[in-house]
Image (cartoon, rainbow, N blue to C red):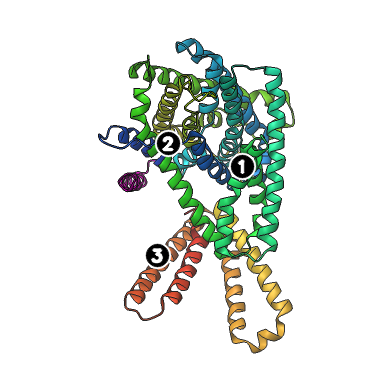
Amino acid sequence: MHHTLLLVLGILFAVFMLVMLAQKIKVAYPIFLVIAGLGISFIPGLPRISLDPELIFTIFLPPLLYEAAWYTSWKDFWKWKRPIGLLAFGLVFFTSMIVAYFSSSLIPGFTIALGFLLGGIISPPDAVAAATVLKGLKVPKRILTILEGESLINDASSLIVFRFALAAVLTGTFSMQQATGQFFLVAGMGVVVGLAGAHIMYVIHRFLPTNAAIDGALTVMTPYILFLAAEQFHFSGVMAVVSGGLFISFRSHEIFKSGHTRMNMLGVWTTMIFVMNALVFILIGLALPEIIEGLGEYSIWEAVKYGLIISAIIIVLRILWVFPAAHIPRWLSSRIRQDPSPGWKGPLIISWAGMRGVVSLATALSIPLMMDDKITPFPHRNVIVFITFVVIFVTLVFQGLTLPLILKWIKIEEIDHIAPVNEQQAGIRFNLNSAALQKLMGHYEQDLISNEFLKQLKDELEADLNMTRQKLETFGCNIAEHNRIEHFNHILLDLYKTQRMELFRLRRENLFSDSEIRKAELQLDLSEMKVTGAGH
């Protein structure tokens, strides 16, 4: 056991090194993860780790879905609900159906139910993959919002398809009419359970004496609580996690009032989701040799061929769906035509950003090893898992590496009128400082006379307001003025870097206590975030 754990930690460390290399050469790290997963399978002598498939589903999926819901803007999501819904529901069901019929006719012994199972697994694109590939590239806000919203809801819809198809394989019976009714019941009640659980967690966070550590721990527990509670009543745990995550995210400003709490949670979740992504690909790498051995009557080349054909099918299906879905509603509705047209460039980017990732892999690994009788092996399980890995590999590596090239080639511009990020940041800062100054002068007038520190704070707020006002005025000016702001920010960051090096010197020479050094370092972090934004 110790040897196996040490080996997994060593592989995990090697994967982290690969991710750092990916960041250095500006390649999305999920691409390196899928390559690492494949590479691990070729290392001789590695142990084969057997995990309960249901345990994989329960451990990995709730936090992955919850994190996606947490970072989804409800305002933007609701604004673009029509294209999101067409992709998240329409395209998922369309893809699942076509994959079901193609795979059942392509793969010997494959049934329609197994085809729907495979379709439910590989139909949802991955949010992390698209976000990391597009990070730092010039992409219209509308496209990013649609991709984020789609990846959130299509995980839910595809996993419901997966669960129904799995039940059909296990029981050998399937009724479309009964399944449709069950779908709405299971999904709807999953939302009810999710919102009920989210309200309970809201009350705990807001009205009980929690601290940063407890808040962070509770947010990690929340997706598991919502998922397991819904599954206990045989409702959709996926819909419970998504709906609960959206609610808590929308009310987070009321719940988490401490900056320390929010920064702590950001660190916890960023680390946890990153490690989970890496672990899933390590697990598939360790499982691939056994999966290949268990292909049965299929050779590895036949399985690769099936995977490549199905990869091509889902890429083509997405293109065939996205372009009509982007333009036909505009032909039918004058209200929709009031929004700027996406043209052909927007649909092209959305079509090509359909990369599959960790959710599909975790779902495939969750297929049970045995049928309900605990004697008969689950039919074609290894073939399905292998095809899923091929689909992820093809879409991540091929589409992930070519998507930035397509963006540079088409030179897409912002579709909708959106104020520049710098202007929005300056506007927010101006309003915040104005409110603080008004409060200071209105409620603490006597203190300003007697307290030198408050006088200094008032002067600083006024100086910051004047500087921010000048910045806002430059947004109506020429490009030279904008360059002056960018140059100012560059120098400011360089000054912060110098101050950080000085902090390292003070710590090294033991001139001040570690606690005070950490406080000063936190202030520097906050100052940097004012310039770069939290996602820098």
Q: Earlier in the sequence, mark 2 or mark 3?
A: 2
Seen in the image, is 425 located left or right of residue 39? right
**Where does label 3 land, which residue?**
494
Q: Which residue is mark 1?
A: 228
Identify the residue position indicated by label 2 in the image. 404
Compared across the picture, whether 220 is left or right of 7 comes to right
How far apart marks 3 and 1 lie (CA) works out to 48 Å
Mark 2: give few (<14), some (14-19) or many (20+) Cα within 10 Å. some
Front: mark 3 or 1? 1
Say which quarter of the image contains residue 342. top right
Q: CA distance from mark 1 to mark 2?
A: 39 Å
- Badges 1 and 2: C-beta atoms under 8 Å apart? no
- Three-letter amino acid code at disc 3? Asp
The amino acid sitting under disc 2 is Pro
* Residue 477 visible in rendering: no
Q: Please state if 393 lies on the left or on the right of 482 as rendered.
A: left
Residue under the point 31% across and 37% down: 47
| Percent coordinates x, y for residue 416 in the rendering | 62, 40
Residue 15 vs residue 61, the one in the foreground: 61
Amino acid, disc 1: Leu
- The magenta region covers 1-27
